[in-house]
């Protein structure tokens, strides 16, 4: 036990958000208590599932699903603004792993962050309809429609506070552990795999027929290479709408997070190495979970020291 109140902050990051599952599991394996949780966007969703006791079920479910099926959990109904609705599918996905409907029912106190679309104010939601609050925090601009709440239109909290450390402080947390998913670092395991692949030399040509065949293949390969080089010199094709939105949101979140951390840094910052994972790559679930676990395990000694625990090597 620790005399300190520990707060867990789960940041935004779309498909990278499954790394939060690995981070929470690493904290649980190390017996680190979590007294309050706050989250933004996908961090709000995973945080709510954790606070309701359904994290293990969620992990099994997302691993079993492929990326296309996961992305389909948005209502394929375009509303007036040309965005996806999403209410029905989010409720369905959440209710598969939790029977909680309001904040008061949760096992751990939770606050989620959204943003006022017109004023740009941070909006902290911590009471009433849990699913509506999650839907607001998950309203990714350009993809999901805003949510009407008390005469305000709310969108994804990541546009104002992607990793809401200040909210955890306001909840009374003495030690704040934050998981930021914006790292550009690549997984060490993927680096090692790339380096481990040896270059395979071409097999020796054993007779005249094979020599002629190899020459033909070389000629074809040369033509293809020349064609590709010519294509590279042509005017580049502009990126698609999803790529543009994805890149713009990610750049914005990185800069906002940097500014917010300068004003209100967490005590422990966990940054999974997910630089090779795009924001909408929903087919990399196990990779994201593993990197979340690895990054958190590397911080356990620091966390225990802050908690006043004896660290065993």
Image (tube, grey):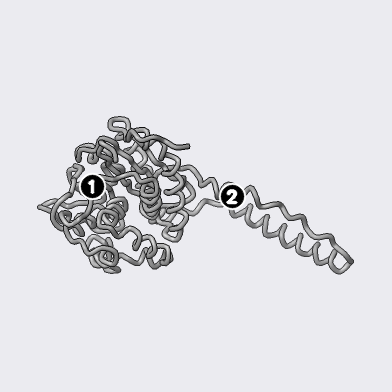
Circle 2 Cα neighbour tier, 10 Å, few/some/many (<14 / 14–19 / ≥20) = few
Circle 1 Cα neighbour tier, 10 Å, few/some/many (<14 / 14–19 / ≥20) = many
Asked if marks 2 and 1 touch (Cβ < 8 Å), the reply is: no
**Farthest left residue in view:** 151
- Disc 1 on helix, strand or loop? strand
Q: Distance between the Cα atoms at labels 2 and 1? A: 46 Å
**Farthest right residue in view:** 208
Tell me if residue 226 comes above or below residue 184 in the rendering: below
Question: Which residue is at a point 24% across and 67% down the rendered structure image?
Answer: 88
Which label sits in the foreground, 2 or 1? 1
Closest to the observer, 254 or 236? 254
Question: Which residue is at a point 41% across and 35% down the rendered structure image?
Answer: 311
Closest to the observer, 38 or 281? 38
| Residue that label 2 marks | 233
Tell me if residue 174 comes above or below residue 245 in the rendering: above
x then y, percent, for residue 245: 36, 51
| Residue that label 1 marks | 113
Quadrant in the rendering for residue 298: top left
Residue 246 visible, this angle: no
x then y, percent, for residue 55: 33, 58
Tell me if residue 242 comes above or below residue 269 in the rendering: below
The quadrant of the rendering that contains the N terminus is top left
x then y, percent, for residue 302: 40, 35
Tell me if residue 71 comes above or below residue 194 in the rendering: below
């Amino acid at each position: 036990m620790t005399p300190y109140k520990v707060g867990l902050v789960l940041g935004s990051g779309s498909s990278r958000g499954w790394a939060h599952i690995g981070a929470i599991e690493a904290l649980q394996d190390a017996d680190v208590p979590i007294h309050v949780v706050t989250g933004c966007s996908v961090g709000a969703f995973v945080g709510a599932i954790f606070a309701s006791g359904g994290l293990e079920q969620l992990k099994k479910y997302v691993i079993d699903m492929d990326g296309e099926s996961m992305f389909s959990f948005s209502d394929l109904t375009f509303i007036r603004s040309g965005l996806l609705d999403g209410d029905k599918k989010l409720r369905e996905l959440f209710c598969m792993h939790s029977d909680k409907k309001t904040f008061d029912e949760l096992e751990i106190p939770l606050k989620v962050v959204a943003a006022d679309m017109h004023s740009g104010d941070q909006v902290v939601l911590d009471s009433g309809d849990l699913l509506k609050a999650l839907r607001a925090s998950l309203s990714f601009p350009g993809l999901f429609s805003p949510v009407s709440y008390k005469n305000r239109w709310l969108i994804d909290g990541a546009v104002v506070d992607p990793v809401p450390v200040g909210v955890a402080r306001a909840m009374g947390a003495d030690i704040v552990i934050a998981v930021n998913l914006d790292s550009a670092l690549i997984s060490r395991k993927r680096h090692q795999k790339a380096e481990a692949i040896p270059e395979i030399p071409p097999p020796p040509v054993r007779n005249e027929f094979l020599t002629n065949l190899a020459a033909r293949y070389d000629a074809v390969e040369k033509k293809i290479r020349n064609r590709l080089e010519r294509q590279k010199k042509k005017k580049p094709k502009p990126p698609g709408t999803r790529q543009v939105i994805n890149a713009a949101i990610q750049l914005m979140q990185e800069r906002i997070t940097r500014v917010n951390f300068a004003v209100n840094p967490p005590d422990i910052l966990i940054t999974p190495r997910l630089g090779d994972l795009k924001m909408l790559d929903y087919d990399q679930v196990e990779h994201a979970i593993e990197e979340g676990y690895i990054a958190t395990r590397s911080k356990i000694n620091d966390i225990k020291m802050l908690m006043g625990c004896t660290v065993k090597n």
